[in-house]
Amino acid sequence: MSDLEGAYRRLLRVYPRWYRQKRGEEVLSTLLDMARPAQRRPSAAEAVGLVVHGAATRVGVGPDGPLAGVLAAGASPMLLAGGVLASVALVLGGPAQGGAGVRGPGPVGGTAGPVAPVLYGVWVLAVALDVATRQRYQRSMVALAVLASVIALLVADLVGLGRPRLFVVAALVAFGAPSLLRPAWTLSHQRPAPMLVGGLAALAMLASCALGALGPSGVGSLPGSVSGSGFYQGLLATLAAWTPLAALAVLAVAAGLVVAGRAVTAGVLAASSVPWLVICVGAAPRHSTATFGAVLLVAVLAVFAVAGVSHRPGTARSGLRAQR
């Protein structure tokens, strides 16, 4: 064994065992064929490339990892759901907290500063560009929206303006997380159908909770009403109260999909409930509901992880084809 071959074999240990058994010799042969005459060690670019790709494959986001399929299938639907949430917040009562008497600019008016509307506008813009450009600028726009979220929280506190509540910003970031984490090679596998399904699911959730908030058993009243209940005490508080029931259903269906070998679908379904559970933990009207929401959040993340590691290697692409 030459020094160069030994160095390549050591780098290939970054990959999981199943990958080395399946493609290790092929990769090693390719690397040796491409080596320069008298080359004794891998170049820096080769070493970095092998380590990065090996680590991505090990955690399930490489070309043969099921989590890559989950992120590809769920990126645009979850971003669209976040845009729906941001749009509702922007129109019905840009949520704010901060100085005394600060309220969101709901249908009846309000005195909140400009931070919340601008932030939600950035998230809506990210969704609009995602739809218009077929995900070409998805990662860049979501990164900008996440950066704007961090800056908005810091600036609003520094200058004393009303700011969005932290748990809602966290939910928006959770909606955008698949866009940031998805591998670049999956961009061509996205189709409009999952986006439409994700948007309709978000609208259905928000609409049902809005009706619950307006009903006699609702937690609050119309967002932005003169009673001062506001956007959060009405719509989102009721959403938080109803989310555990939906999460239980998601857990049951996702677990069944894992058993049936539909890892990508199960992972997308589990991931889609995470932002709503974040809102539940932050906005639930009762401490017991918030605690139950936190337990369900851990359980949903566990199902997501199981979906990623239980599927046989090499099925990610077939899962992606199923999403097309």
Image: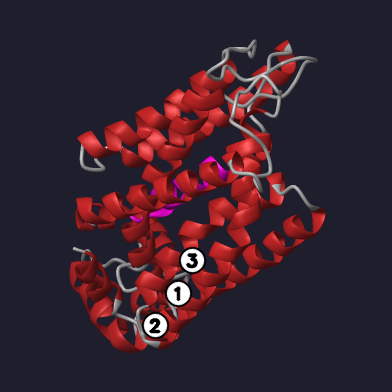
Going by the numbered disc 3, the residue's amino acid type is Ala
**Rounded to the nearest whole Å, what is the CA distance between mark 3 and mark 1?**
11 Å
> How crowded is the residue under tag 2: few (<14 C-alpha within 10 Å), some, or many (20+)?
some
Secondary structure character of the magenta stretch overall: helix
N-terminal-most mark, 3 or 2: 3
Tell whether 157 sits left or right of 249.
right
Tell whether 4 sits left or right of 108.
left
Magenta span includes 281? no
Image quadrant holding the N terminus, namely bottom left
The range drawn in magenta is 170-183
Residue 209 seen in the current view: yes
Residue 115 drawn at (x, y percent) = 58, 18
> How crowded is the residue under tag 1: few (<14 C-alpha within 10 Å), some, or many (20+)?
many
N-terminal-most mark, 3 or 1: 3
Q: Nearer the viewer, mark 3 or mark 1?
A: 3
Disc 1, SS: helix
Residue designated by label 3: 270
Image quadrant holding the C terminus, namely bottom left
Residue designated by label 1: 308
